[in-house]
Amino acid sequence: MSSGASDLDARSALSDSARQTADARETTSDGRRAAARRRRRGYLLFAAFALPNLALIAVFSYWPIIENVYLSFTTWDFISPQAEWAGLLNYQSLFSGWSFPEVLFRTLVWVVVVVVVTLVLGLALAMLFAQRLRGANAVQTLAFAPHVLSGAAIATIWLFIFDPNTGLSRLVFEAFGASSPAWTNDDSWALWALIIVSIWKGLGFVAIVYLVGIQQIPSQVLEAARIDGAGRWTQFRRMIFPLLSPTTFFLVITQTISAFQSFDVIAMMTGGGPARSTTTLSWFIYDEAFNRGNVGVSSAASMIMFVVLMAITVLQFRFVERRVHY
């Protein structure tokens, strides 16, 4: 009798164990299905938000690049029904004459001077803002204002300043007993006039970005340096500037790209003249396409500009970033 009861209990225990195993499997299966449903909803939500943006990027960014690559191997004037294949003729014509190499050199001078001077003056201005002087907030607002103004407005203002007869620059030169040059009409001065305007336009942005970087430096670090007897120049050279290396790296890249793409100030103030003395790469691309109808040449110059920017960016990430202290 006890043996039969024992067998019954054993079978009952096995049945309960089987039911528990089945329930566990069912629970695990339900959990997997629920997790799969959550993943599908997540994918659908991602697609709903990302695909429209990716489509816009593809249509307005990547497709124009692909189309520009094709046009750089053709000849077209915006009027002919279709472009004619020209192979490498456009690239050969760019480097066969003296004009385009001169444009590249002028653009390089423009970029180096604008970027270096803007960063140096912007850092000096940021160090001044960091002193928390009275009225510093108002000065910061005034310094940043040119960054949010349109290039057309800035160019108009500076055209009045550079006027040799009634402009403010005339007063500065007269204070030293000299006459003001015809800034935008003299091929010896026109490029430097545009460089001055570009530096003034970007100075406030660089100063504010540097100021934010300075404010992120722990005060304990500078206080320890002062206790150890480090002067202001030593603090700046040994501590502040190295700790600002990520900010400097960011600004070098963004300001280099911005300087290469400068167009609005040139268009409003000189139109690439006089005698093409202010024709940089960005203006050359526009001028060849829309003023001269050489779409193929313009597209080839655009590809060269793209390659140059990519090369500069890669070199900066490869070599300059090694000196960045995060």
Image (cartoon, rainbow, N blue to C red):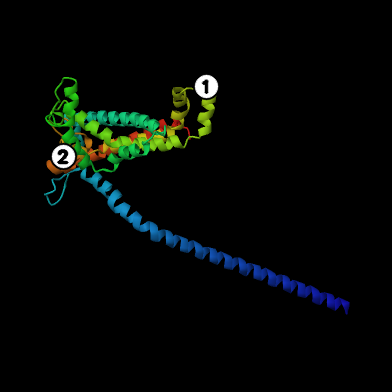
Q: Residue at x 16, y 36 (%)?
A: 269
Q: Is residue 140 visible?
A: yes
Q: Which residue is drawn at 20% across and 30% down?
A: 193
In the picture shown, does residue 216 fall above or below 57? above
207 or 176, which lies in front? Answer: 176
Q: Residue at x 50, y 22 (%)?
A: 230
**Left or right relative to 136: residue 79:** left
Label 2: which secondary element:
helix
Q: Which amino acid does label 2 sit on?
A: Asp
**The quarter of the displayed image where residue 299 is located:** top left
Mark number displayed over residue 51: none
Residue at the disc numbered 2: 287
**The quarter of the displayed image where residue 115 is located:** top left
Classed neighbour count for the residue bearing mark 1: other residues with Cα under 10 Å, few (<14), some (14–19), many (≥20): few
Compute the Cα span from label 1 to label 2: 58 Å
- Residue 241, position as x, y percentages in the image: 43, 29
**Left or right relative to 115: residue 229:** right
Mark number displayed over residue 229: 1
287 or 202, which lies in front? Answer: 202
